[in-house]
Amino acid sequence: MVEGPIPLEQLLIANGTKEFYGHNKAFGTIGSFMAIISIMSSSLLILFVTHSKHGLSTTYHRIVFGMSIADILFSLSLATFNAINPSDVDYFVWNAHGNQASCSAQGFVGTFGAHSGLLYSCSLNLYYLAVVRYQKKDYYIRNRIEPFLHGIPLGYALIAVITFLVKQNFNNGGGQNCITPVYDPPHCIGYKDGDIREGFTIPCGRG
């Protein structure tokens, strides 16, 4: 540990952390409400698709279903009102009552949803390209193209989140998400990587 660390109160004032705390509360509340709306919207879309005439029997519906699941996963990670963020950062992250395990879980779910959702959007574009531009039949798309339209988004997202988890890259950087590669909050100023400041539990420089 470092001898004579800068008092935390002095760090908060110097870095404007106290002012940021109020803004973080507003962002956390608004962001969580928007995430809940997104979850409801994607859930309704899934309901419409699964109860439609063709259900999940078409490639288009299966892609939309995958996109909706991805959005729900991503939105779930934001709909917590910051409650599962580690309590170590509760002095500048509003409503943080979790620990590093809950932070890593949130980062895992949110990152998987974000990456797979983005690539599923690309899959939908490729599907339209095959249908509209190249006029491919449904059986051709289903057998030759569709496996990649699901496999790439899910495979890439899974590899990414496992890599981040192993490398300890799911950390809180002061916002709603635990997606900061390296843990470097204000209370770690003056401390070396691996040090744990008295009163805290997460090593500085984690990741």
Image (tube, grey):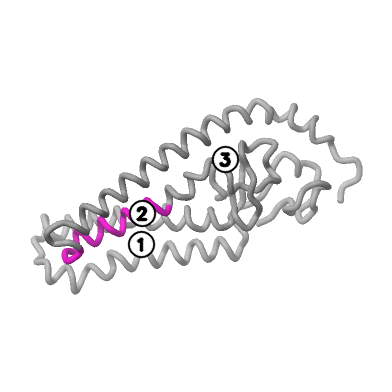
Q: Residue furthest bottom?
A: 143
Q: Which residue is mark 3?
A: 175
What distance separates the C-alpha of mark 3 from that of mark 2?
Answer: 21 Å
Q: Residue at x 13, y 71 (%)?
A: 140
Whether residue 109 sits left or right of residue 20 in the image: it is: left
Callout 3, which amino acid? Gly
Callout 1, which amino acid? Pro
Callout 2, which amino acid? Gly
Quarter of the C terminus within the rendering: bottom right
Q: Residue at x 63, y 42 (%)?
A: 96
Task: Kindly state the secondary structure of the residue where label 2 is placed.
Answer: helix
* Nearest the eye: 68 or 115: 68
Q: Which residue is mark 2?
A: 117
Residue 58 in magenta stretch? yes
Q: Is residue 44 above or below residue 158?
A: above
Task: Kindly state the secondary structure of the residue where label 3 is placed.
Answer: loop
Determine whether label 2 and label 1 are within 8 Å by CB.
yes
Magenta range is: 56-73
Q: Residues within 10 Å of mark 2 (few under 14, many from 20)?
A: many
Q: How many marks?
A: 3
Tag in front: 3 or 1: 3
Q: Residue 189 occupies which quadrant of the picture?
A: top right
Whether residue 174 sits left or right of residue 144 in the image: it is: right
Q: Which residue is mark 1?
A: 153
Q: Is residue 45 above or below residue 153?
A: above
